[in-house]
Amino acid sequence: MTDSGNGAFTFTDSAGRAAISSSGFGASGNTVTVSGFSSSYTIDWGTASSNFSVGSSTASDPNCTKVIPNYAGSQPVITAIYLPNGQSYSFTYESTYGLLNKITYPNGATVSYTWAQNSDSTFGATMDSDGLAQDCQYYYGTPAISTRTVSFNGTTTDLSQSFTYATNWSGTTGIWSTKTTTVQTTDSLRNKQFTTSYTYSPVIQVSPPYEYSHFALQIPVESTVGYTDWGGSSTIRTDTKSWLDQYRMQGEQIQNNGTVVSDQFYVFGAGAMITGKFECG
């Protein structure tokens, strides 16, 4: 691999051929060339602006007189990708958080997103005005998807989803016990709905030594996922998961209508992973 800087690189295979190469990253007209194609992928770039408040609130220390300020800024974003076959994808962004709000596919289909503040969902701690480490403690929010809409022709809504979130804080400052996300999906063609409910448990990440502040020390991992029938009147499937850490799932059990149909466990060893599986017909 040869790195020429500013996103320009070349991967050369063992026969001396340029397998993948890039002319750069961040400027409109940048290309990615893949061996075997007659033309390159071309990328258009633009700028997305954002201006929002995280809605922070002080948890305790009276020596914390400041709150997390509004964020205002801009960042480079990809606005279009042109394929070697002449087709293209386009991307647009909303102005509050500067996040993706629409993807248009080569056939005219679209996926659109709206975003909202997931208030008081995260915790951080910094040094207070007396110089005490991690004594300035805040709850604050982060942007999260509010709705997702799919259209096969770019005009008619074929599927829509709404997302709601909750963080259940324990009695200890800054420690949450569970997080939940509920997704309600509507099939517009059949005018039917179902609900998917996610519950997350925390995995703790350890702060580096001599670190005087921290943010989001708990990493959410899926503990249960529940799926309802059409109409959302009853849960027809539940997946239950256990984790060794945020990277390795220890086990997963699947129940259909309250009956266990699959039970999997994972044993990790040096350089290997062993999987055990039990299924019922």
Image: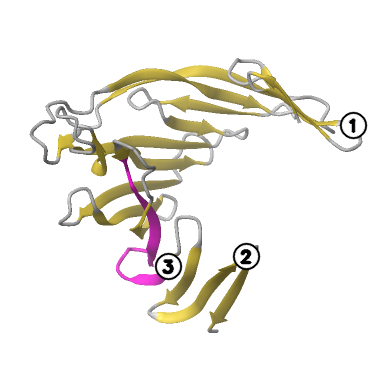
- Whether 252 is drawn above or below 8: the answer is below
Image point (83%, 27%), residue name:
38
Name the N-terminal-most of marks 2 and 3.
3
* Residue 19, x across and y down, in percent: 81, 33
To which quarter of the image does residue 75 belong? top left
Name the N-terminal-most of marks 3 and 1.
1
Q: What's the residue type where badge 3 is placed?
A: Ser
Q: Nearer the viewer, residue 156 or 69?
A: 69
Callout count:
3
Q: Which mark is residue 242?
A: 3
Q: What's the residue type where badge 1 is placed?
A: Gly
Other residues around mark 3 within 10 Å, as few (<14) / some (14–19) / many (≥20): some
* Residue 269, x across and y down, in percent: 60, 68
Q: Alpha-carbon distance for marks 2 and 1?
A: 36 Å
Image point (18%, 28%), residue name:
67
Image point (23%, 36%), residue name:
133
Residue under label 2, please give it. Answer: 270
- Whether 137 is drawn above or below 92: the answer is below
Q: What's drawn in magenta, residue-wise?
A: 215-240
Name the N-terminal-most of marks 2 and 1.
1
Q: Alpha-carbon distance for marks 3 and 1?
A: 47 Å
Residue under label 1, please give it. Answer: 16
